[in-house]
Image (cartoon, helix red, strand yellow):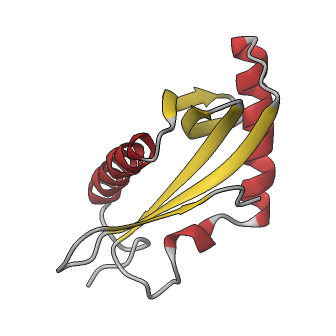
Amino acid sequence: MPTPQNTPPDHRAALGAYGERVAVRALTDAGLQVLGRNWRCREGELDVVAREGDALVFCEVKTRRGTGFGPPAEAVTAAKRRRLRRLAQAWLAAHDHHAPDLRFDVVGVHVPDAGPVRVTHLRNAF
């Protein structure tokens, strides 16, 4: 079975896009209102920006086919968390958006070769 590192780039992109669609469906099913997807700036990209009540939620989506490298959410390293915080600041500045609460969630999507897709939503992940 291919790992994310040796999977052809077009397959990785398709897997990532599929994982984001699954994650958005799970978030909306959980009652979050999606405000934006794949927002980009010089610093990088935010996968999903959503609102839940008074909270503005910045969601990082990680999709994996296997668990050889651990659960998908473990791919959000300290450096990635710092970058996501900078991206959130840039999104807030670009959208002149204010919210009483800010939250960073991680949505892990595991797409096995056989069986159902598994989604893990970690609220307040960092």
User: Whole-percent x and y of residue 62?
Assistant: 49, 60
Q: Is residue 3 left or right of residue 62?
A: left
The residue most toward the top is 96
Q: Is residue 125 left or right of residue 25?
A: right
Question: Residue at image x 82%, y 28%?
Answer: 100
Q: How many numbered discs, if any?
A: 0
Q: Is residue 114 left or right of residue 33?
A: left
Q: Is residue 93 left or right of residue 108?
A: right
Question: Residue at image x 26%, y 85%?
Answer: 1
Quarter of the figure that contains the C terminus: bottom right
Question: Residue at image x 17%, y 80%?
Answer: 114
User: Whole-percent x and y of residue 121?
Assistant: 53, 60
* Quadrant of res 101: top right
The residue most toward the bottom is 68
Q: Nearer the viewer, residue 101 or 109?
A: 101
In the depicted structure, whether residue 119 falls above or below residue 42: below
* Quadrant of res 12: bottom left
Question: Residue at image x 51%, y 78%?
Answer: 71
In the depicted structure, whether residue 62 falls above or below residue 52: below
Q: Nearer the viewer, residue 98 or 7?
A: 98
User: Whole-percent x and y of residue 61?
Assistant: 51, 53
User: Whole-percent x and y of residue 77?
Assistant: 71, 66
The residue most toward the left is 114
